[in-house]
Amino acid sequence: MLLTVADTQRSHDFYTGVLGFRLSDWVNIDDHIRLCFLHCNERHHSMAFVPCMPGKSPRLQHVMFEVESLDDVMCSCHFLRIHKAPIGMGPGRHINCQTVHVYVQTPGGFAVEFGWATAVSMMRISRSSIQLAVPLICGAATSRARN
């Protein structure tokens, strides 16, 4: 689940200090956009926060449903295209958690992500949380460099 919030640091502090979540990553998109990824189980992240756009209120940005295989992601994408659903992003792969995904916009104003390959155990990964300063989607760095 990704929520837009007024203050990512304050949200981090509440979810880690009060609710017991643990930090997975801080992702720095630019000087003003810093995403926070937290987990409460073996998944890379259970909750993520991104700053609200200027003038916008905090809201649910998307929820993710984990599917069992890469084929399931691709079948979901195909199904969405056949039904002319508004695909927001994908198929693609997130750089921090390696999830292969496709997003569809819902009438409720938030997206649903169908994702695979996020169940890698954090307990088996021997690393501290990292600070990424790269785009979240493979290929975005190449596109951005051309602009």
Image: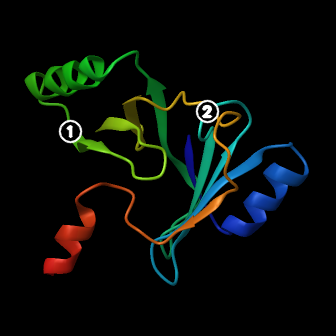
Does residue 132 appear left or right of residue 41 in this picture?
left
Residue 124 pos. (x, y %): 66, 33
Q: Quadrant of the C terminus?
A: bottom left
- Residue at 55% x, 30% y: name it: 120
- Residue at 12% x, 29% y: name it: 81
Can see residue 106?
A: no
**Picture quadrant of residue 123:** top right
Residue 113 pos. (x, y %): 39, 34
Does residue 35 appear left or right of residue 122 in this picture?
left
- What amino acid is at disc 1? Pro
- Residue at 49% x, 76% y: name it: 54
Chain-order first, disc 1 or disc 2: 2
**Label 1: few (<14), some or many (≥20) within 10 Å?**
some
Give the number of callouts: 2
Q: Is residue 129 above or below residue 68?
A: below
Q: Quadrant of the N terminus?
A: top right
The circle on residue 71 is none
The circle on residue 43 is 2
- What amino acid is at disc 2? Arg
Residue 66 pos. (x, y %): 46, 24
**Label 2: few (<14), some or many (≥20) within 10 Å?**
some
- Of residue 34 and residue 24, the one placed in the foreground of this image is 24
Q: Identify residue for label 1.
A: 86
In what element is the residue under mark 1? loop
- Residue at 67% x, 65% y: name it: 8
Q: CA distance from mark 1 to mark 2?
A: 28 Å
Q: Is residue 106 above or below residue 58?
A: above
Does residue 59 appear left or right of residue 19 in this picture?
left
Q: Is residue 120 above or below residue 34?
A: above
Mark 1 vs mark 2: in front: 2
Residue 137 pos. (x, y %): 32, 55
